[in-house]
Each structure stands twice: as structure tokens, then as C-alpha cells.
Amino acid sequence: MQISLKEALLGFSKELKHLDDHILNVQKEGVVQAGDIIKVPGEGMPLHQSSETGDLFVKIEILFPSELTEKQIESN
């Protein structure tokens, strides 16, 4: 899942479209680092010869800005 730098620092709540087209809400409070993995219990693939489902693991990718505005540069 791709998140912004702001979301990585402050936390986020985002919707994710699952393989079967249902919408899943993924959220995290506080600081998230690139490469962090969020475990969503019971939302993974069906387990072999079982009616249960496994866990879904969402890997975080942070989108860093490619350039800064003049205002952002001045505040540093």
C-alpha cells in the first residue's frame, strides 16, 4: 500500500479493494516506516481444505515528495 509522507508520520486510514471486490479499511496510528507490514486477521486467502481464511499482510511503501515548495523550504 502506498501512503504519503504525512500519513507515515501521523497515521492513516485508507480503503483497500480486496481480490473479491469488497472494500477493506486498513488503518495505523502513529509513525509508520517504509517496509512495515500490517497484519489484517481473517482477510487472507482461504486455507487449504478448510472453511477458514488466513491473514492478509499489507506492506507499506512511502511516497516521498520529489520537490519542495518555497514555503516548505523557508520553514526549515
Image (tube, grey):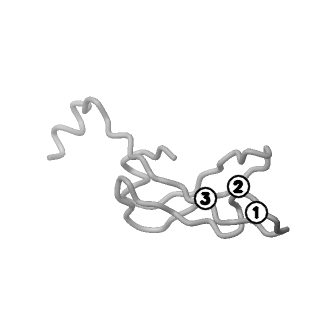
Residue 31 in percent (x, y) is at: 37, 64
Q: Residues within 10 Å of mark 2 (few under 14, many from 20)?
A: few
Q: Is residue 26 left or right of residue 59?
A: right
Give the residue at mark 3: 26
- Residue nearer the viewer, 17 or 4: 17
Label 3, label 1: how far apart the Cα atoms are:
25 Å
- Contact between labelled residues 3 and 2, with CB atoms less than 8 Å apart: yes
Q: Is residue 44 left or right of residue 65?
A: right
- Residue nearer the viewer, 53 or 66: 53
Amino acid of disc 3: Val
- Contact between labelled residues 1 and 2, with CB atoms less than 8 Å apart: no
Q: Residues within 10 Å of mark 3 (few under 14, many from 20)?
A: some
- Contact between labelled residues 1 and 3, with CB atoms less than 8 Å apart: no
Amino acid of disc 2: Leu
Q: Is residue 60 left or right of residue 39?
A: left
Label 2, label 3: how far apart the Cα atoms are:
6 Å
Give the residue at mark 1: 48
Identify the mark nearer the N-term, 3 or 1: 3
Residue 49 in percent (x, y) is at: 82, 65
Q: Is residue 72 left or right of residue 49?
A: left
Give the residue at mark 2: 24
- Residue nearer the viewer, 4 or 61: 61
Identify the mark nearer the N-term, 2 or 1: 2
Residue 59 in percent (x, y) is at: 48, 53
Q: Is residue 67 above or below residue 22?
A: above
- Residue nearer the viewer, 72 or 15: 15
Query: Which residue is rendered at x = 62% and y = 60% of the image?
Result: 56
Q: Residues within 10 Å of mark 1 (few under 14, many from 20)?
A: few
